[in-house]
Amino acid sequence: MQAVGTLREALISAQIRDVLRLGRGAKAEEEQENRTQKILMAYSMFSQHHLNFGEEEKYLMSTFGLNPLMNVNFWSVILDNDQNVSPKILSDVDVGVYNIIYVMPKVKDILFRETDKNSVFVKLQGGVEQDVKRLRVLIGQTGQSLMKVHALSEVIHAIENIYENLANFLRVDHIALSVGSIDSGSAKCLDFFGTPEVITEYSELINSVWQRLKYASQDELSYQVEIALMSVGFTTRISEAQKNGRISEQDRGRITNAISKDIEVLFQNGAYTEDMDELEAVRASDILPNQSNTIQMASRGESRKIEQKPVTLDPIPVARVESITSNENAGIENAGIEIGEFHGENKKSANLS
């Protein structure tokens, strides 16, 4: 459902439904004022969001019939105010946008489970209630694939080992790490629950290490993880804990080495947290999936095409949009959009999907 939220935010930010009303020839004065600027701003905003879309967001666009939004000719006919643009195409896109913005959040509420909460209360032995926090770990895949058992086992053991070692380092009373749910989609999703202090430390540490590795090559991963742990200050904190008597000298070396190796295991098997997959230039789900740990599924009939390759939209900077639209006589060609020839028979046969 994270992909739904990402796509929904892009559609709302770009005000795509307002643009579609302009394409259907809305006559209200407030709709026609600064028409070109509104369209170009929507084009610029949505294309900027699209640069950060992953496979899931692009698959959703295909499923809900939103691929015309990535077709240059679609924007051309709206800019031209062509009254003969296919009403069906505009209607289909509008329905898809409506479903993403209004319907899918309700579906998410229907499918919501107790274990989807970031924190829950659990009853321990003796009836004592304790707050536990969720740690969501995803295991990336390439296309449709089956994950090998040993790879899943390695990931779970690595997560548990890191959790226990961090608990020992923090010297906090903690409960055993528990599994709340395991789901499978474009990525395997595992929800763990544990002591809040330890889960918070885990999330911050793994994300900090990732921020220092995401632009690095995949060679000598073990060495790079060790350097990253030093650069984020974790090694220093371990040393200080040993000096203060919180942990022994033996524990200092053991905890550091164990966490370094387990983080390496996670990255090698394509495991990442939601924070590591935030919308940035480099996303964990695009880099970490390990094809050697999966078995690709053969499809029958028409395969599900996740990777769509429509015409690429080059984002127009907002400053340039305002510059273009400030000149009343500025031609559409100055906006950097290639205008398609939608006339005569071509208009009826044009494929905007």
Image: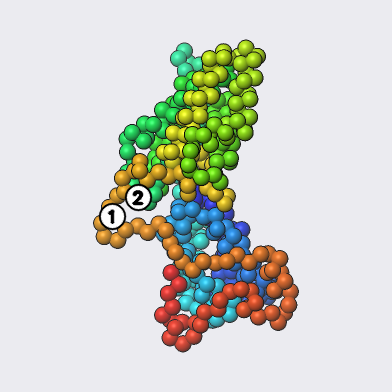
In contact (CB < 8 Å): disc 1 and disc 2: yes
Q: Is residue 297 left or right of residue 338?
A: left
**Number of disc labels:** 2
Return the residue nearer the eye: 55 or 101.
55
The label number, if any, that marks residue 299 in the structure image = 1
Return the residue nearer the eye: 267 or 100.
267
The label number, if any, that marks residue 117 in the structure image = none
Q: Secondary structure at mark 1?
A: loop
Residue placed under numbered mark 2 in the picture: 144
Q: Is residue 281 above or below residue 182?
A: below
Residue 245: % across, % down: 62, 12
Q: Amino acid at mark 1?
A: Ser
> What residue sits 60% from the left and 30% below the top?
230
Residue 257: % across, % down: 50, 25
> What residue sits 39% from the left and 31% below the top?
154
**How far apart are labels 1 and 2 at the CA level?**
9 Å
Q: Is residue 13 left or right of residue 225?
A: right
> What residue sits 50% from the left and 27% below the top?
259
Farthest residue to the bottom: give it: 344
Please rate how many residues cluster around mark 1, counting C-alpha atoms within 10 Å: few if below 14, some from 14 to 19, many from 20: few
Res. 212 in view: yes
Please rate how many residues cluster around mark 2, counting C-alpha atoms within 10 Å: few if below 14, some from 14 to 19, many from 20: some
Return the residue nearer the eye: 186 or 37.
186
Q: Amino acid at mark 2?
A: Gln
> What residue sits 37% from the left and 59% below the top?
305
